[in-house]
Image (cartoon, rainbow, N blue to C red):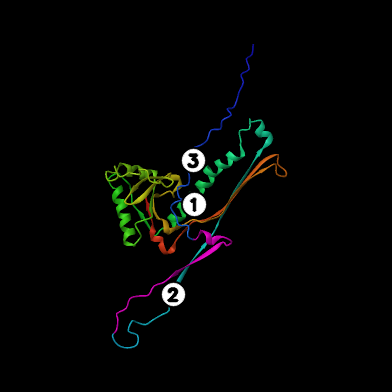
């Protein structure tokens, strides 16, 4: 006698691993509101005057006065991204209603939209960094020295100590965690912890970054908050129930965003590469 075995799908949906945004707390939002209603924002930098030797006679004792100049920097939004999908009512009914529109939208945001924006920010910030240096193979013996060298470059460029974040690739972070200088310094306590922060070193928040988020040869990146911009002009998503032509749900999202480096403060971004 034949035995017909039944197949049944579990009602629970397995969720994939994901990362919340690792960059949202580490860049300046000073010009974000300026993009409302416009695509391009021009930021003006006021110049300074040189020092002179004072002359104790004549009419121009302080030097020859010239009109104080200025420099403009132009930032134009270029990223206009979107997604869309449907959840057919018939298909969903025959799958025991596994595909909830609201839950699927949250999944789309955390697994697709957020990582894309983070990766784009790292790409633009690294391409426009004030300093990019090949540090070669990183070991637990030299990783701390590499960071000290980076700090020295930034200090000599008069970059403020406060507001620096170290974004460490998993490879770089692995060596850092084994460095004798770092062991015992990881004291987060009960303080408020920014998203992704896993420790502190040399007065910098440390954030561990999946290697896929960073350009292929980037091992670490130090970003001063005031040196980076990443405005999001439009951030919207919709769930349409039974729209014309569809029996079920239509989900749509659109995001206009970009990333920039403050031209005046680009020395506040330091990138260490493998080559």
In space, the residues marked 2 and 1 are separated at their CA atoms by 34 Å
Query: As rendered, which of 128 and 55 lies closer to the eye?
Result: 55
Helix, strand or loop status at disc 3: loop
Question: On screen, 212 above or below 152?
Answer: above
Residue neighbourhood size for the residue with mark 2, other residues' Cα within 10 Å, grouped as few (<14), some (14–19), many (≥20):
few
In space, the residues marked 3 and 1 are separated at their CA atoms by 17 Å
Q: Which residue is mark 2?
A: 69
Residue neighbourhood size for the residue with mark 1, other residues' Cα within 10 Å, grouped as few (<14), some (14–19), many (≥20):
some
Q: Position of residue 213 (x, y in %)?
A: 45, 47
Q: Which residue is mark 3?
A: 18
Q: Position of residue 156 (x, y in %)?
A: 31, 61
Q: Which residue is mark 1?
A: 120
Q: Is residue 71 left or right of residue 255?
A: left
Q: Is residue 237 left or right of residue 200?
A: right
241 falls in the magenta region = no
Residue neighbourhood size for the residue with mark 3, other residues' Cα within 10 Å, grouped as few (<14), some (14–19), many (≥20):
few
Helix, strand or loop status at disc 2: loop
Q: What segment is highlighted magenta in the picture? A: 31-55
Furthest-top residue in this view: 1
Instruction: Count how many numbered circles sit on residues in the image.
Output: 3
């Amino acid at each position: 006698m034949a035995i017909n075995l039944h197949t049944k799908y579990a009602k629970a949906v397995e969720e994939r691993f994901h990362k919340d945004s690792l960059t949202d707390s580490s860049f300046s939002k000073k010009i974000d509101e300026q993009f409302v209603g416009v695509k391009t924002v021009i930021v003006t930098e006021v110049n300074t005057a040189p020092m002179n030797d004072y002359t104790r006679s004549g009419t121009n004792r302080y030097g020859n006065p010239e009109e104080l100049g200025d420099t403009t920097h132009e930032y134009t939004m270029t990223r206009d991204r979107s997604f869309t999908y449907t959840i057919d009512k018939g298909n969903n009914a025959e799958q025991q209603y596994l595909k909830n529109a609201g839950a699927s939208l949250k999944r789309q945001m955390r697994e697709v939209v957020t990582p894309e924006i983070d990766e784009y920010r790292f790409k633009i910030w690294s391409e426009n960094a004030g300093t990019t240096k090949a540090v070669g193979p990183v070991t637990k013996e030299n990783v701390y020295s590499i960071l000290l060298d980076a700090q020295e470059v930034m200090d000599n460029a008069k970059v403020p100590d406060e507001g620096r974040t170290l974004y460490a690739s998993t490879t770089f972070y692995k060596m850092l965690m084994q460095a004798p200088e770092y062991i015992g310094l990881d004291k987060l306590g009960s303080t408020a912890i920014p998203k992704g922060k896993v420790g502190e070193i040399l007065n910098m928040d440390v954030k561990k970054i999946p290697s896929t988020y960073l350009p292929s040869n980037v091992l670490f990146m130090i970003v001063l908050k005031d040196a980076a911009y990443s405005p999001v002009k439009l951030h919207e998503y919709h769930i349409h129930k039974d729209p014309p032509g569809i029996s079920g749900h239509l989900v749509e999202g659109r995001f206009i965003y970009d990333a920039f480096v403050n031209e005046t403060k680009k020395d506040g971004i330091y990138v260490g590469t493998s080559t």
